[in-house]
Image: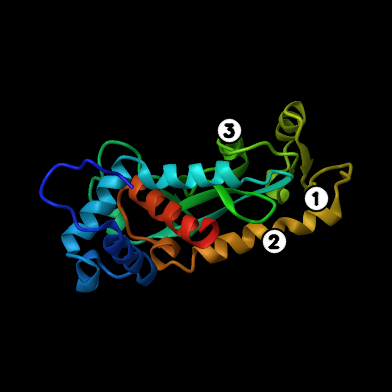
């Protein structure tokens, strides 16, 4: 955990982190956190400060690189509705990964999981962003080598297949009905796509993940990374 922090004597991190987890899992406001887990201002400031420094996302990256099993990986994306509290305000000059889609103002979570279904990459974009166009950016952040990439029909693109083969990755992606010629793919390994769907379901058990309440994309990404660390890497 971060050390050498300025100011008075710090409260124990082991007391503050349960307070952060309580807010994330219950979906309550920061001010409504239990007093037993530290003062509400301290709990929020600790989470916000570490988010600004990229501590939570770095923790996920370090754990994923240490335990990544890349025999087969799966990629997919899911929508998350942005609460009114996340839509309001300026939120700074940088884009906050919120866009207009059919479900209203949403954020899209792009994930890459290993053969055990553990997220190694979690990337945020506005809800109206194409999943297949974001795939190269997700794969560029892969914590380890990948032999086969499993994806659904939404990732059926000739340029993506060619890019994967150039990198030595075997695509396991079914073709869409729009293709004039049917593509052959490994149906047995394609059944393993359920692992990434299960990962999304597990992450959305955390209420502040299932509905985005944070205005800043970095804070929401930090909450997402912390939820993934607790659920899959601890």
User: In the image, is 61 to the left or to the right of 165?
Assistant: left
Residue 11 at what x, y percent from top left? 20, 58
Between 135 and 156, the one nearer to me in the picture: 135
Query: Residue 177 has which mark?
Result: 1
| Count of numbered marks | 3
10 Å crowding of disc 3: few (<14), some (14-19), many (20+): few
Q: Earlier in the sequence, mark 2 or mark 3?
A: 3
Q: How far is disc 1 from disc 3 in space, using C-alphas?
A: 29 Å
Give SS at disc 2. helix
Q: Residue at x 24, y 52 (%)?
A: 46
* Distance in Å between CA atoms under marks 2 and 3: 23 Å
Q: Is residue 106 visible?
A: no
Q: Which sits in the foreground, 202 or 66?
A: 66
Image side of residue 131 versus residue 168, left or right: left
Q: Are marks 2 and 1 in contact (CB under 8 Å)?
A: no
> Disc 3 marks which residue?
140
The answer to whether 205 is drawn above or below residue 140 in the figure is below
Q: Which residue lies at the image location 55% right of the left edge and 59% below the top edge?
A: 232
Dot 2, crowdedness within 10 Å: few (<14), some or many (≥20)? few
Residue 159 placement: quadrant? top right
Residue 114 seen in the current view: yes
> Going from the N terminus, do you reach mark 2 or mark 1 first?
1
Cβ atoms under marks 1 and 3 closer than 8 Å: no
Here the colouring is: rainbow
Kind of element beneath mark 3: helix
Q: Which mark is residue 69?
A: none
Residue carrying label 2: 194
Q: Residues within 10 Å of mark 1 (few under 14, many from 20)?
A: few
């Amino acid at each position: 955990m971060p050390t050498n922090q300025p100011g008075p004597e710090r409260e124990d991190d082991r007391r503050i982190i349960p307070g952060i987890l309580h807010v994330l899992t219950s979906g309550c406001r920061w001010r409504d956190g239990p007093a037993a887990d530290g003062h509400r201002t301290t709990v929020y400031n600790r989470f916000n400060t570490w988010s600004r420094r990229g501590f939570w996302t770095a923790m996920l990256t370090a754990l994923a690189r240490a335990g990544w099993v890349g025999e087969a990986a799966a990629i997919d994306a899911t929508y998350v509705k942005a609460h009114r509290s996340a839509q309001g305000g300026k939120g700074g000059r940088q884009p906050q990964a919120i866009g207009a889609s059919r479900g209203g103002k949403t954020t899209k979570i792009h994930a890459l999981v290993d053969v055990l279904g553990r997220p190694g990459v979690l990337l945020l974009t506005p809800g109206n962003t194409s999943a297949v166009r974001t795939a190269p950016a997700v794969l560029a952040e892969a914590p380890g080598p990948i032999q086969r990439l499993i994806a659904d029909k939404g990732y059926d693109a000739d340029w993506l297949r060619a890019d994967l083969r150039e990198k030595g990755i075997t695509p396991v992606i079914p073709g869409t009905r729009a293709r004039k010629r049917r593509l052959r793919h490994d149906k047995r390994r394609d059944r393993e796509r359920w692992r990434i769907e299960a990962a999304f379901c597990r992450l959305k058990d955390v209420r502040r993940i299932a509905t985005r309440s944070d205005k800043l994309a970095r804070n929401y990404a930090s909450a997402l990374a912390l939820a993934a660390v607790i659920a899959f890497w601890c």
